[in-house]
Structures are given as C-alpha cells and as structure tokens.
C-alpha cells in the first residue's frame, strides 16, 4: 500500500513539474492556470508587473496613465504630450518645445507665470543666520534676472545682483575670471559687427521718477570696491561715483583731501610716478609722493582762469580786495603792457597848465619829503603802488621837470646875452 501511494505522489509531482515548465506563454495556458484573472490587485500593493531584474519591454496604453490623482496623456488635437496635476502643468510638443505654465510654448523652453511670483529659482540652504534659503538664480516675469525684492512698479528689481551679508566676503553681480596668460575674460561682453549698437550692460528708464543703472556696484565694507571698471563704457546720462544722484555728466563725491602721497577724488596717472590729483577744491601735481610741476595748457593755446568773483591768485589763497590778479611773490616778464582808463599827462604841455614854481616845489618837498602827487614811502610800503597810476604820475613829473629845464635854459641864455 505504501508503495502505491509513493508512486502516485511521484507521478503527481512529475505532472506538476511538467505543467510548470510547459506553461510559460499566454498562448499555452492550461488548467489550473487562470486565463481571465483581473490585473487589479486583491490587496493594495500586492501585485507587480515585472520585477526588479525582469521588466516589460513595451507598455501600450490607449488613454491616460494615472499616478495617484495626476496623469500623463497625449493630446491628439495639439500633438502634445501633457502632464496634468489639477491642470495641464507641462507640455512637450512635436517640435520639441517644452512649455511650463503655458500650453503654447514658442521656445525650446518656455516658462510662464502670473503675477509677480518668480518664474524660476535656483536655491541653496542658508548656512548662517537670517533667511532660510539663498537665491543663486531668480528670474521674475518683470524682466529681472538675479535678485529682486520689491514690486515691479516700485523698485527693488535688479538686472543682476550679487549679495553677501558677511562684510569680509565679496558679491559679484557678474564675474568673469580667466587663468590663461594670454586669454581674455569678460564678465559681460557686447559685440556688434553690423551698423547697429551692442551693449555689454545697458540700463534704461523711461519714467522720469525711475532710476536706471548701466552698471551698479555697491560695497559698505572698508576693503570693498564700489563699481569697478577695467574697460570702456558709454553713458548717455549723468554718471555718479560715490553718489546715487549725479547732477552733472560725471559727478564724483566722498573723496579725501589730496596729499603728495595719497588722497583725492580723481587721479590721472600712476601713484608711484607722475600723476595729477583732483579733490573738491584743488588740483595737485605730484611724482611718487613728491611735489611736481603743474602745467596749465602746456604747448597749447590760450589759458583763462577765473574764480567765482573774477579773481585770480598766485602764491596766495586770499585775493587782494579790489584787484582781479593777486601775486604773492616776484613776477618776471619780457614785456608788460598797461592800458589806462584815464588820460596820459600830456596836459602838462597844454597852455594854461599851472606849473608850480620852483620855490613852491621846494617848500612842498622840504615839508612832505616827497614830490607832490607821489605817495610817501610809508604808504607805498603798506599799500604798494598801482603800476598804471604810478607811471602816469611819474610821466607828469618828468614833463614838469622838462618845463623847469626849459625855463632854466631860458634864464641861462638871458644871462649870457646880458653879459655880452
């Protein structure tokens, strides 16, 4: 009896093995394999299609493919593959254009949004105190790239902005670096080979109350650079250095007093060689920390200097009252021409001129110790002389002296004739 049962069991096992090996395709299904079994799992998460190392090659679906409440589908009307999560969020057209936030992309990647929310952001976790995230890239629909904090109509929108909170670090809006010995690196580069204009960086404002910055650099640290330029730039409006409200084409403020070794608002030349420095009230020529000659219009044309009141001073900062030119020191010239506003003393030779008698002249000289009409020595020492007026007075005395000589010659001639 045991032998019969053992034989029957062996035959049953062999039959099952044969059935298991033979039923590997759907076309060869035999009992007890179920032919019309539902693909829906009897329990959640209890049925797999494929395995980790054996997958289905192709899966053909005529309809929507659901993942939870979201689904992906193909829109035959627009020839677009779409992903829907409450609404169509992403589309891929047959031209290869990808749309995010739009069903009609016109670029390879077309991202749109509504309101003033960011279009795209790239962030990293904040490692210090303050905000929880650091914006590496943030693009707004208000034509903003970089970092924006305010409403589009109010301000706070930057073309590009580099920002750090640590005063020892440096933030660059645009930064280009080259390690090659002969290569050129441009942070921002604009080039045009046609008749048009090309701008590396361009800021434009149409509103009278708005502010447009072509390039704006700001640093509050001691060692920071504020707006560094190494190339050429064109500005069609006022440019401010040290001020955000320039009043003229180039407005420089917040410099220091010029010294022989440092300081100033504007420097032309190398500090270690010849250079000219300008501060808010002087122009100084210097050469590596030492005084140098300052030339005005050397080898050029005319030179005109005039302060607000019309005075010019040389060797002194205080102009003499009532005089346009004040020189504290010696003046050497090949020729000096004086144009007088009064008359030249030829009136001495006119008929009716009252020539003082020699007796009266002697009395005046003995009493006053100077010629009549000529200032005394103490007056000249205190007040100086007026060149044109002194020349006029001296000519008057010379002409009077000539008349005295003529009179004396007549008396000599009369004496000679009387003796004969």
Image (cartoon, rainbow, N blue to C red):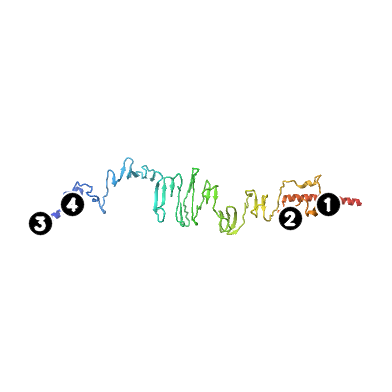
Residue extending farthest to the right is 420
Camera sees residue 407: yes
Marks 3,4: beta carbons within 8 A:
no
User: How crowded is the residue under tag 3: few (<14 C-alpha within 10 Å), some, or many (20+)?
Assistant: few
SS label for mark 3: helix
User: How crowded is the residue under tag 2: few (<14 C-alpha within 10 Å), some, or many (20+)?
Assistant: few
* Label located before the other in sequence (4 or 2): 4
Across and down, in percent, residue 355 comes to 81, 48
Q: Residue at x 16, y 52 (%)?
A: 19
- In the picture, measured across the screen, residue 224 lies left or right of residue 285, that is left
Q: CA distance from mark 1 to mark 4?
A: 164 Å
SS label for mark 4: helix
**Which mark is on residue 295?**
none
**Which mark is on residue 378?**
2
Which residue was labeled with disc 3? 5
* Label located before the other in sequence (3 or 2): 3
Across and down, in percent, residue 174 comes to 46, 52
- In the picture, measured across the screen, residue 392 lies left or right of residue 122, that is right
* Label located before the other in sequence (1 or 3): 3
Mark 3 or 4, closer to the camera:
3
């Amino acid at each position: 009896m045991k032998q019969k049962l053992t034989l029957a069991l062996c035959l049953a096992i062999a039959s099952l093995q044969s059935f298991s090996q033979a039923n590997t395709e759907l076309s060869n299904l035999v009992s007890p394999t179920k032919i019309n079994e539902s693909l829906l799992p009897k329990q959640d998460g209890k049925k797999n299609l494929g395995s980790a190392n054996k997958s289905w090659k192709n899966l053909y679906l005529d309809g929507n493919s659901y993942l939870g409440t979201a689904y992906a589908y193909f829109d035959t009307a627009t020839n677009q593959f779409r992903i829907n999560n409450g609404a169509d969020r992403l589309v891929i057209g047959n031209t290869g254009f990808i749309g995010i936030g739009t069903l009609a992309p016109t670029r390879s990647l077309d991202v749109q949004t509504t309101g003033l929310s960011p279009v795209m952001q790239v962030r990293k976790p904040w490692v210090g105190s303050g905000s929880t995230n650091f914006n590496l890239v943030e693009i707004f629909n208000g034509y903003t790239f970089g970092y924006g904090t305010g409403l589009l109509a109010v301000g706070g929108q930057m073309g590009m902005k580099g920002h750090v909170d640590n005063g020892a670090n440096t933030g660059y809006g645009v930064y280009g670096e080259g390690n090659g010995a002969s290569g050129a690196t441009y942070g921002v580069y604009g080039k045009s080979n046609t008749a048009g204009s090309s701008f590396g960086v361009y800021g434009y404002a149409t509103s009278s109350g708005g502010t447009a910055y072509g390039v704006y650099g700001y640093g509050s640290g001691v060692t920071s650079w504020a707006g560094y330029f190494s190339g050429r730039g064109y500005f069609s409006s006022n440019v401010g250095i040290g001020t955000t409200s320039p009043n003229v084409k180039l407005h420089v403020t917040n410099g220091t007093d010029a010294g022989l070794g440092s300081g100033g608002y504007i420097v032309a030349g190398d500090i270690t060689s010849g250079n000219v420095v300008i501060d808010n009230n002087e122009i100084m020529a210097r050469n590596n920390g030492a005084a140098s000659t300052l030339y005005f219009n050397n080898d050029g044309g005319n030179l005109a200097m005039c302060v607000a009141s019309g005075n010019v001073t040389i060797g002194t900062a205080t102009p003499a009252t009532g005089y346009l030119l004040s020189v504290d020191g010696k003046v050497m010239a090949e020729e000096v021409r004086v144009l007088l506003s009064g008359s030249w003393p030829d009136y001495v030779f006119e008929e009716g001129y009252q020539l003082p008698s020699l007796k009266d002249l002697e009395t005046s000289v003995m009493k006053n110790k100077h010629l009549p009409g000529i200032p005394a020595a103490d007056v000249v020492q205190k007040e100086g002389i007026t060149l044109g007026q002194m020349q006029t007075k001296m000519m008057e005395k010379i002409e009077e002296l000539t008349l005295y000589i003529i009179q004396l010659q007549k008396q000599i001639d009369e004496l000679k004739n009387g003796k004969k």
